[in-house]
Structures are given as structure tokens and as C-alpha cells.
Amino acid sequence: MLNVQSEEIVPRRWYNVVSDLPEPLPPPRSSDRDHSSIELLNSIIPREMLRQEFTFNRYETIPEEVRVQYLQIGRPTPLIRALNLEKFLGYRGKIFYKLEGATATGSHKINTAIPQAYYAAQEGIEEIVTETGAGQWGSATALAGSINNMKTTVFMVKISYEQKPARRTVMSLYNGRVIPSPSSETEFGRNILKENPSHPGSLGIAISEAVEYTIANGLRYMLGSVMNSVLTHQSIIGQEAISQLDILGESPDTLIGCVGGGSNFGGFVFPFLQSGRPIELIASTAREVPKFSKGSYEYDAIDSAGILPMLRMYTLGSKFVPEKIYAGGLRYHGAAPSLSLLVRSGRVNTDEVPEDEVIQALKIFASTQGIIAAPESGHAIASLIRYARNRDNQGKTIVLNVSGHGYLDLKIFEGRE
Ligand SMILES: Cc1ncc(COP(=O)(O)O)c(C=O)c1O
């Protein structure tokens, strides 16, 4: 069997890594600028999200309605043996990949958008709000809002809004209202536009606008990554992979995934920690955003505007402006506190890959397995190829997480065909 699919593979509970970490997880702290930022966060996210953010429970029951929606958007996602890639690399071992790009919205982001929207709907809220850079998170939120019969407003960084019209179309098809940020919808946006009417926007500005709009209208704000509750929701990736590998009678030696804020990586690898087996874990990041090798481990703001609380994590500084690499989702300055702790303790290894190598890796994956992966996922693929080409790593069973598809990112190949 090379590809295992069955409804029963979708778990009935999420796994929260907090109680299995080598030391207590440092809690969020109010930011230096705004001493009430924790209270602010508390007032804009669904109450259930807040509870899950601070719980020590190892497991959380997935509401049946949420599980049904997981099935609707294509879960379980496939786990496929990459025989063609193994052959191409001459790898003497096994390579499997978990394909989160097979969900309806094309990435893992929908795994947390669905429960967050569901919890907001349970509170009687009629509209949810978020920001998006490249558009993956905005698309997932818009669909989650639509299937929960809520309006969704997405503040999209203006430069991406202009450069990525296809993503805008996707969000509109999911009934999302997409607003280029900075906008005249908020005071924060209006002030920026007054100074510079053609401001290209930034994720920090988009977050500020989304938060202001949420507060002003008594709505709920959706969190895309980094927070522990988000990683808990993403644990369905790893739990499904464990069941699928069990069915195949396989046991992995190495897990590889990419890291932006850490949600697909944490969701994929953390459930495997429960086994206590010494599985090698490799977090792949962009060389252009060297958060683990050049960042420091300290309290820093989640957002560049400093509105939300601070987290203790590996960070390049919330004001860090990375190069304009295609993998927009990996340009984030920090990494989830739980993942940061595991990197610091040496349990998770890291690998940094430059964009040129990522493009080569994406091409190899496309021409062998037929999968055009997202530029973000291309980092994990590049790390896998490096790993499999190392003579010391022959004979192992490697599992890779492919966090999204790249059909809306084909520009990365222009002039490189
Ligand atoms: C396809 C894809 N992979 C990875 C990421 C990185 O985010 P995270 O580290 O939270 O999984 C993103 C974020 O936008 C993404 O869209």
C-alpha cells in the first residue's frame, strides 16, 4: 500500500505538546509598549481559543462539527511513498510525504481556521477578521467563515493585493471581503494614508488594522500561527501521519518540515514526541530569515506593530525586514515558543536553505512526484534532498510534510524553466 485513506484516520482529539516539553512553556507577556496587550488579546479571540492557549491538558476533544468539516475539506490528507523521488536520488531507504496541499484551500492553514471560526460562531459572532500577507491564511479564514455562515473581513497587505490578484479571487469566491491595507476602514490606516497615499503596506500594519476593526465592531480575530492553540489544532497532521504509518507497518527515523511561525512543523512533528522514540526532527527555514542561527531567544512582540502580547521565542526582532523571497510564509521574524524551546534544548535540529536551492528542489519534486509544492514547502523538500544525499543517512525512513501546493505561486519558476 502506497497511499492510505480512510475517514477513521482523522483523529477525534487534538494533541497539546505543552505538558511534554523539557521545561515549562514561558507564557505570553504584555508588550513593552502596551501594558494591557494580554487583556486586549483576550478580548478579541474566541473564549475557547483563550482557554486552549493556556491549558495544560494533553488532549482536547475535537467538536464533532469541526471533525465533519475536516472531512469536508479533504482530510485525511494523503500520506504517499515518494518512490520516484527515492529512485531519482538513488536513496537507499524510504521517503514518505504528507500532502497538506491537498486540502480544499491548498494548505494546512484551514486546520486551525475551521475550529477558530466555529468557536466564534458558537459565541453568536457574525463576522470574523484577520490579516493576510501572501493570502494562504486569508483564503483559509474566508472559507472557514463561509462554512460557518459568517462574514469574513481580510486585511491584505496592499502590495500583495496588487501583485497576487488570483489569491484575492480565491478569497472572494469563499465570500471573503478583502481590503487592501493600509485602508480607510480604520483610524490607523487613515493616518498612514494621509502621510503616504501609495503606502505598499506591511503585515504589521495589516494586523493593526485587523485588530482595530475587530475591537471597534465587537468581532473576533483569527490567529494564523505561532500561538500554542494554533499548533494544537495543527496536531491533526502528525496524528494522521502516525495512524497512516501504523497501517503501513512503518516507523519513521526522521521528520522534516518547514518553519514560518511554526504551525505546520509543530502540528506535524509534536504528536510523534509522545512515543518517546529518538526520531530525528529537522526544521527547515529560509537562509534569508535565519531566526534559529542568528536570532536570539528572548521575549519579543508577535507583530511588528507591538499591539499583541510578547512571546519568548527565537526571533530576529519584530522590526526585522527580510528579503523579498517567494516563500512569504517563511518571512516571519520569530518561531512558536514550544518549537523554540525544543530547538534550544537540541531536540529539534534546524537547516537553512537559500531560495535558489529551494527552486531546484521544487522542480525535482514536480518532475518526480508530479506535485507542485508551495515555495514554503520547497524549503522542507530541499532539506530532505540534502539529507537523503548524505551517505550517513542511507537506509532510513524519512517523512516530509508538504504544507501547501504552489499553483498560485508559479511565478517563482519564470525564467527558470
Ligand atoms: C504553504 C505554507 N507553508 C508554510 C507556512 C509557514 O507557516 P507555519 O510555520 O505557521 O506553518 C505558510 C504560511 O503562510 C504557508 O502558507
Image (tube, grey):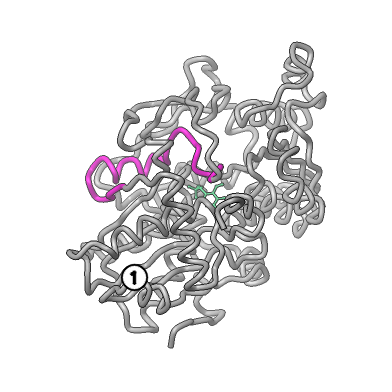
Q: Which picture quadrant has residue 59?
A: bottom left
Foreground: 156 or 119?
156
Which residue is pictured at 48% across the width and 62% down the height? 402
Q: Is residue 310 above or below residue 338?
A: above
Judge by depth and name the residue closer to the eye, 62 or 100: 100
Q: Quadrant of residue 315?
A: top left
Does residue 109 appear in this view?
A: yes
- Tell me residue 75's x, y (percent): 58, 71
User: For mark 1, does the 10 Å Cα neighbourhood hold few (<14), some (14 to 19), or many (20 or more) residues?
Assistant: few
Name the quadrant of the N terminus. bottom left
Q: Residue at x 73, y 16 (%)?
A: 192
Task: Tell me if residue 377 comes above or below residue 288 in the rendering.
Answer: below
Q: Is residue 330 magenta?
A: yes
Q: Quadrant of the C terminus?
A: bottom right
Q: Which residues are magenta?
A: 327-350
Question: In this orientation, which residue lies closer to the viewer: 399 or 269?
Answer: 399
Q: Judge left or right: residue 286 versus residue 117.
A: left
Residue marked by disc 1: 89
Q: Secondary structure at mark 1?
A: helix
What is the x, y in percent for residue 249? Answer: 32, 83
Q: With 28 as the anchor, is 190 left or right in this view?
A: right
Instruction: Determine the residue positioned at 44% across, 59% down.
Output: 361
Residue 280 placement (x, y as % from top left): 25, 59
